[in-house]
Amino acid sequence: MWTWKASSPNGWNRRVAIATMIVFAAAVPLLSGMPHSEKHENRRVIDNLEETWRNAALKGNSAALESLLADDYMAITPTGVIQSKEQTLALIRNGTLRFKSIDFDDRKVRFYGTTALVTCRAEVEGVSADGNISGSYRYTRVYVRDAKGAWRIVSFEANRIREPDPRKPDSHKPVANK
């Protein structure tokens, strides 16, 4: 049996560390938000939805895209333009936004309760009202599970990956916070 003596600081520190590890070990399942098997299944579902989105975008299938997007969907394009669900679907329907190819890599999916956050890199070939949109992008897509259990896209934001300026040797490094 342990005795809690304040006169032995090393023993006290060890006991506090052990107690902290026990509490943390007990809390980890609570902090994760869902069991591992459920996370694995939801990850598979989100990966499939990402592929469904990709195929619908490549085929210009606005009906399939409409079923993926929540009614309050909002996108921020690489040029900073905000688009609603209706605006996004209209661009697909009228052919203003067309994709020749979309290839994904470096996808990460994180879950926060009934929300899934997807970050990914995409190599895109296509055109929009602004012209050629071919290039490398990083995007974030947010899915929320609705009351019926279906995952819907509520938000999307894409940014073009810019190559470092060779005239500026440190242009590829992030700016340090002061």
Image (tube, helix red, strand yellow):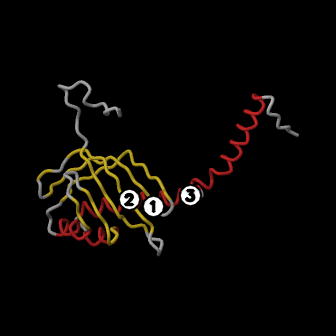
Q: Nearer the viewer, residue 29 or 127?
A: 29
Q: Is residue 97 positioned above or below 171 on the image?
A: below
Element type where label 3 sits in the image? loop
Vertical placement of 73 versus 159: above or below?
below
| Viewer-closest of 80 and 70 | 80
At 15% from the left and 65% from the top, the residue drawn is 95
Do the numbered discs 2 and 1 sit on residues whose CB atoms are within 8 Å?
yes
Measured Cα–Cα span from mark 1 to mark 3: 11 Å
176 with respect to 27 (left or right):
left
Q: Earlier in the sequence, mark 2 or mark 3?
A: 3
Name the residue beneath numbered marker 2.
142
Q: Residue at x 62, y 56 (%)?
A: 30
SS class, disc 1: strand
Residue at 51% from the left image edge and 61% from the top image edge: 113
| Image coords of residue 123 (percent x, y) | 26, 47
Q: Secondary structure at mark 2?
A: strand
**Image quarter in which the C terminus is found:** top left
State the CA–CA distance, disc 2 to disc 3. Answer: 17 Å
Q: Alpha-carbon distance for marks 2 and 1?
A: 7 Å
Foreground residue, 87 or 64? Answer: 87
Residue 33: mark in rendering:
3
Q: Residue at x 35, y 34 (%)?
A: 177
Q: Quadrant of the N terminus?
A: top right
Mark 1 surroundings within 10 Å by alpha-carbon count, few (fewer than 14), some (14 through 19), many (20 or more): some
Asked whether, in this view, residue 70 is left or right of residue 5, the answer is left
Residue position marked by numbered label 1 in the rendering: 115
> Could you tell me residue 28's position as x and y percent?
62, 50
The answer to which of marks 2 and 1 sits earlier in the sequence is: 1
| Residue type for callout 2 | Val
Q: Is residue 2 left or right of residue 58?
A: right
Q: Quadrant of residue 153?
A: bottom left
